[in-house]
Image: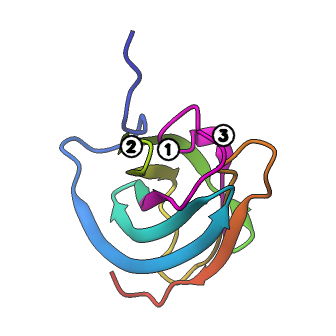
Amino acid sequence: MTTPHLPPAAPTPPRPLGVVPLGIDLGLTGGHRVVLLSLEVWEGWADLRFARIDVEATTRLTRRVPPADAWEVVADGQPLEIFDAVGRGDRHFSNGEVRLVPAPPLTATLQVGVAVVPGEAPVATEIALTGDA
């Protein structure tokens, strides 16, 4: 059984509208650092790209990237749907994307949080987008 990777109303083929570079270090939890790399804006959704880096982790993860239910993204006070969270990598380094529906406005203030290690506090930040993609 396969799962769709695009939201149901997404145009086909998808067309990118822009990329917002981020380079934001969310912090360290349980020896795992999470860095937000960029926000890709597409018609109808956005991909929040990230990297997870093992920094002398004491807890081994069950997945290389945090699953969709570990993420929370709010744009201007409105929760965004986490449509999917996928990635690739190994125990020491992984990267991936969190698919958000709908795409937040490029002038939004985002609150982004992720529970990387079960039982540990999530890492989180607030991002003020500038309108440039």
* Residue placed most toward the observer, 8 or 35: 35
Q: Position of residue 28 (x, y in %)?
A: 64, 67
Disc 3 crowd rating (10 Å Cα; few below 14, some 14-19, many 20+) is few
Along the horizontal axis of the image, is 79 left or right of 99? right
The reply to whether the C-beta atoms of the residues labelled 2 and 1 are less than 8 Å apart is yes
**Disc 1 on helix, strand or loop?**
loop
Residue at position x 60%, y 72% from top?
A: 26
| Label of residue 69 in the image | 3
Q: Position of residue 95 (x, y in %)?
A: 38, 53
* Residue placed most toward the observer, 3 or 42: 3
| Number of numbered callouts drawn | 3
Along the horizontal axis of the image, is 4 left or right of 58? left
Mark closer to the chain start, 2 or 3: 3
Asked where in the image residue 43 lies, by quadrant, the reply is: bottom left
Vertical comparison of 122 with 38: above or below: above
- Quadrant assignment for the N terminus: top left
Most distant residue in the bottom direction: 130
Identify residue type, mark 3: Asp
Asked where in the image residue 21 lies, by quadrant, the reply is: bottom left
Residue at position x 49%, y 44% from top?
A: 65
Cα separation between marks 2 and 1: 6 Å
Read off the magenta span. Answer: 48-75
Identify residue type, mark 2: Gly
**Disc 2 on helix, strand or loop?**
strand
User: Would you say residue 59 sits in the magenta stretch?
Assistant: yes
**Disc 3 on helix, strand or loop?**
helix
Most distant residue in the left direction: 13
| Label of residue 65 in the image | 1
Which residue was labeled with disc 2?
87
- Quadrant assignment for the C terminus: bottom left
